[in-house]
Image (cartoon, rainbow, N blue to C red):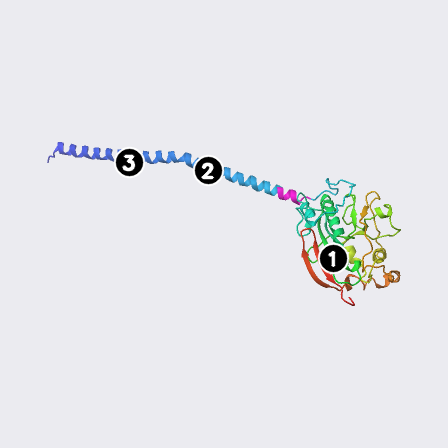
Amino acid sequence: MGFNLPFHLSYKLRLLLLFTLCLTVVGWATSNYFVGAIQEIPKAKDFMANFKAIALGKEETLTNEAFMKKAELENCPSVSPDLRGQSKLIFKPDLTFEEVQAKNPNVHRGRYRPEKCKALQRVAILIPHRNREKHLMYLLEHLHPFLQRQQLEYGIYIIHQAGTKKFNRAKLLNVGYLEALKEENWDCFIFHDVDLVPENDYNLYMCEDQPKHLVVGRNSTGYRLRYNGYFGGVTALSREQFFKVNGFSNNYWGWGGEDDDLRLRVELHKMKISRPKPEVGKYTMIFHTRDRGNEVNAGRMKLLHQVSRVWRSDGLTSCSYKLLSVEYNPLYINITVDFWAGA
């Protein structure tokens, strides 16, 4: 049995050519694919580089923000670097509230907080008031920068007595304490007459472990203490200290006696009154005549003899009043109250 050799060779040759052609096509397609892929790699590298840069940038931003936040939370120093010491006070006759406001752009709704550090204390300044707008303006002009240089977080509350009833400074200060605590858990309270302006910012408006009397001397007394045991004008008590003595008495209508009453309450609780050095605790008293409705309290000595017997029942625990309004002015919070008959 024989077979056709030429036909057999021709068939094998055709298969070989077909196989070679297939390999050529596959090789060409594969090379194009990988060349395209290789050309795309730089783009991927650029993307990853950009992504890494963005991520690092965000990380750096977050780190800076965290650093700033931490810096803001650091406590202010015990002695502010902004203090100037003794200042010469000037009272412009044509001063306006708008001018005072313009000088204190960081005071909002009567409150201020340091920007660069965390204040050591939150301090409420309580100022009893009636018909003393000019004095109030002068005090605010000097008191706001004074407190800011001390790096305090503070709020200034003006407690205004409406009506024509005799003025009751002590009761207004009780009201200020109670109302101020409704919006902030203040650490320290400064009970401040509207006509006394501090001269030296080393006279720190902060509370200590004992009650503090800040007015060692004033211009009207030759910068001497008015009398031994004097505890009026401007005093500082912590939230706990004032609560402990049940605040001021509510029974001193007219001028005088309420500050001595508070001193006796402090002494009854075995607390000692501290004062700054005479050259530091200096104030200028803005001259004025006795206000109508604030005549001398003729019965003040009788009330002083009752302190040890009545302090528990006469004070914060018995302070009744009608709250008429709470207004948030740019430079202070104004609390207006009325003391009705029998209150």
Query: Which residue carries the number 1 mark?
Result: 159
Looking at this view, name the residue that lies furthest to the bottom: 342
Which amino acid, mark 1?
A: Ile
Segment colored magenta: 68-74
Q: From the viewer's perspective, is residue 52 above or below residue 194?
A: above
Which one is earlier in the sequence, the residue at label 3 or at label 1? 3
Assess whether mark 1 and mark 3 are in contact (beta carbons under 8 angstroms).
no
Identify the residue at horizontal 57%, vertical 42% (top origin): 62
Look at the image and tell me whether residue 247 can be seen. Answer: no
For disc 3, the marked residue is 26
Residue 72 covered by magenta stretch: yes
Q: Gap in Å between the C-alphas at discs 3 and 2?
A: 33 Å
Q: Relative to 116, is 261 above or below?
A: below
x and y percentages locating residue 59 in the rendered image: 55, 40
**Left or right: 274 as drawn, with respect to 138:** right
Closer to the camera in the image, 56 or 283: 283
Closer to the observer: label 2 or label 1?
1
Q: Is residue 244 above or below residue 144?
A: below
Residue 58 percent across, percent down from the top left: 54, 41
Mark 3 element type: helix
The three-letter amino acid code for the residue at tag 2 is Met
Few, some or many C-alpha atoms within 10 Å of disc 1 (few <14, some 14-19, many ≥20)?
A: many
Front-most of residues 315 and 296:
296
Q: Which residue is mark 2?
A: 48
